[in-house]
Image: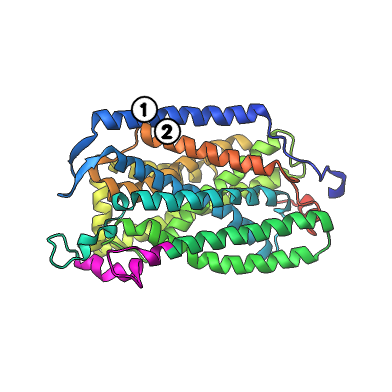
Amino acid sequence: MAASNYNLDQKFDFTDAVKKAIFTIGGIGLVLLILGIVIGMFGSGHGHGDEGHHAFHWTQRLYANLWINNVYFTGIAIIGVFFFAIQYAAQAGWSTPLLRVMLSFGYWLPIAAGLMILTFFVASHDLFHWTHSYVFDKSSPEYDKIIDGKGAFFYWPLEKGSFPLFYIVRMVAFFGFWVFFFTKLKNLSYEEDIRGGTDYWYTTRKWSAIFLVFFAVSSSISAWDWVMSIDTHWFSTLFGWYVFASWFVAGLSAITLITIFLKERGYLEMINENHIHDLGKFVFAFSIFWTYIWFSQFLLIYYANIPEESVYFLERLESDVYGPYIFANLILNFFLPFLVLMTRDSKRHAIFLKLVCTLILFGHWIDFFLMVQPGTLGHNGGIGFMEIGMLLVYASAVTFVVLGNLAKHNLVAKNHPMLEESYHHHI
């Protein structure tokens, strides 16, 4: 049977049952989030001060959770577009029936942009120590020479401690270009369905290559801005790679889960166990890549034993709050996928991939939790009702946006010149 004998005009039916399941999970998350807020308001609303500064307030924990989920799900969204672009730049044929699944994650990007920018304007003083003007005031007892030295990176060309113009310009520019490239690639893909031919494939490949160059730079700088600058004294030359690796594994897991979800419901008929195997190999391989980056960053800092660097791991490993999550992070994101997906058969069976990918998505959320909370909340952090609730609300919203937009167009790029090659894909 040739690829043309399949129903290439098939569309995903976003049924009421699926919507109900998403809303149910989102509703559970909302209840847990409200419960967490109530506990924060009445349980520890005005706790003790952290690190000698201002008294802890429950809103700080809310803001930290918003930031964790904004950054995490922004990463999953842009990785969908990134992986789509990789297929064209590499002239890959195997993945042709999966292209629309990858692309659908980009629909979250405009929403993510609004949420990120809004959260920064509302919560920047609770998230980023460098946003306080007193750290740049040499007459203040809280003047910080190190932050003052980095101030131009956030405020240029304005006065340090005023409005972080350079930081905001970068945030807006990154989201603006990401949304632009996503829209361009999306439109080219859908126009190809209508007009056919190979011109659209060549044009998409060109735009994909341009996007990948921009993404290589913007993903690293956004990691410095949005995550590393929380711990303003600390820095790592590997950090851009580290955040990318975490985003990439989470994005690959999400793409795999959506693909299996569709396949089990009778869609994506061309997808066979060889395609599923390839997705499993990507998840397996980049879980190891993430671990390599994690260990490289840790080992270099541990071996050098420079106080300015080692404090980042000490405040996590020696903390009663965060210490256990370091080991949960490694178990969920390395040992579990490594051991479960090691065999060929496990990468070809949906049940293994569904289990591993779901746990990986939670595991890499823990990874971002560990990047953000210690620097923003100190020992007032942890994973409770508020954290789980916020995660479920965001996950439900992203899933709804992805599936809702996936249902508006053909599931398969029917005029893609490599569609026949994908049908004959065998490994």
At numbered mark 2, what does the secondary structure look like: helix, strand or loop? helix
Asked if the residue at tag 2 contacts the one at tag 1, i.e. Cβ–Cβ closer than 8 Å, the answer is: yes
In the rendering, at what x and y percent does residue 197 appear? 83, 62
Q: Quadrant of residue 377?
A: top left
Vertical arrangement, residue 222 with respect to residue 12, above or below: below
Tally of marks: 2
Q: Quadrant of residue 47?
A: top left
Taking the spot 73% from the left edge, 67% from the top edge, the residue there is 203
Q: Quadrant of the N terminus?
A: top right
Q: Specify whether 46 is left or right of 339.
A: left
In the rendering, at what x and y percent does residue 94 appear? 72, 54
State the residue position of label 1. 35
**Mark 1 vs mark 2, CA separation in Å:** 9 Å
Taking the spot 17% from the left edge, 50% from the top edge, the residue there is 53
Which residue range is magenta in the image?
145-168
Is residue 323 highlighted in magenta? no
State the residue position of label 2. 389
Vertical arrangement, residue 391 with respect to residue 51, above or below: above
Q: Amino acid at mark 2?
A: Gly
Q: Specify whether 41 is left or right of 237.
A: left
Vertical arrangement, residue 232 with respect to residue 49, above or below: below
What is the basis of the colouring in this image?
rainbow
Residue 378 in sight in this render: yes
In the rendering, at what x and y percent does residue 32 appear? 40, 29
Q: Quadrant of residue 133?
A: bottom left
Of 231 and 54, the residue lying toward us? 54
Is residue 163 highlighted in magenta? yes
